[in-house]
Image (tube, grey):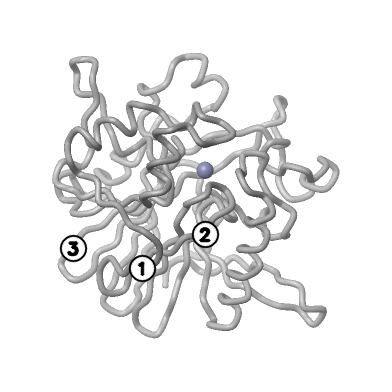
Amino acid sequence: MSQTARLGPTNEPPRLQLGDMRITLLDGGHLWLDGGAMFGIIPKPLWSRLTEADEQNRIPLAMTCFLVEVGGKTILVESGAGPTSKYHEKEQDIFRFAEHSIVDSLAAIGVEPPQIDMVILTHLHFDHAGGGTTAAGDGGFVPTFPRATYVVPRGEWDDAVHGHAVMTATYRTENLGPLEAAGVLSFVDGVADLVPGISVRPIPGHTRHQQGVVFSGGGRTLVLPADLMPTSAHLGLPYNMAYDLLPLENMTNKQQLLDECHAGGWQLLLGQDPQHVLFDLIRDDRNRYRLHAANDES
Ligand SMILES: [Zn+2]
């Protein structure tokens, strides 16, 4: 398989091998968001060259999750929005959610929720953290992955529970409270090595404390910048989202990360790109960066 269209469940998900670490790219569902909001100050004649909008001006976004097997641990990075049953009919209409969620994609490869040891969330917006809790059947919610430690930036948690956001509705109580009540949260402050080969680092901009995830092994490094650059259409520095709390910081940190990726020969994992996940970063002879979709079965 060369490239993988990300919208819709796949029978055999792509896998990446980094030394002893195996990363399976899993379809955590998809949603559609307003194209104008997704590109902030960029006028539609420019962004519409990069992605096509539907009749309601929405563009498709994947919610790719990453199942990492390393050192005897099974780790899930990102959780998508969770099942559509967590959303009101009106929200389902607005966001045009996929029917399937991360639990379905895990089941398709024979992984049950109790097998997950750790869940790493880049930030707590509903399309990243929603899969982390599940309806308990009594009107309440519980952690979807009952044995897992949920790794979250401490500042992101504080901003989420105190509503420090431009869209406070994205920090949903049913995605936060059950994790705290179950005592499964593990907060990180700044750069941290979580297990050999996986580290997190702050990449402020989209939120004040969003974290990126760096995977290293077998002489290869991949970085997941999350909503610093959710799709390949967000490569340009001013291509920020209206949802970003700190657009200027997002631009600065995007530039720094791209420079670091290029210098180190790192590849990028863009979790919300609707067509591809793994990208090579190329710098042309005019010093402009380009992304090339890479073979995601390697
Ligand atoms: Zn976000």
The residue positioned 66% from the left and 44% from the top of the image is 241
Q: Amino acid at mark 3?
A: Lys
Disc 1 + disc 3, Cβ < 8 Å: no
- The answer to which of 11 and 159 lies nearer the viewer is 159
Q: Secondary structure at mark 2?
A: loop
Which numbered disc covers residue 199?
1
Q: Amino acid at mark 2?
A: Ile
Q: Residues within 10 Å of mark 2 (few under 14, many from 20)?
A: many
Residue 175 lies left or right of residue 123; in this view the side is left
The residue positioned 23% from the left and 69% from the top of the image is 70
- Closer to the camera: disc 1 or disc 3? 1
Q: Amino acid at mark 1?
A: Ser
Q: Does the residue tagged 1 have its C-beta within 8 Å of any atom of ligand 1?
A: no
Residue under numbered circle 2: 203
Q: x, y percentage for residue 153? A: 38, 52
Residue under numbered circle 3: 73
Q: x, y percentage for residue 47? A: 77, 46
Calculate the distance from the C-alpha at mark 1 to the C-alpha at mark 3.
Answer: 15 Å
Q: x, y percentage for residue 133? A: 28, 33
Q: Secondary structure at mark 1?
A: strand
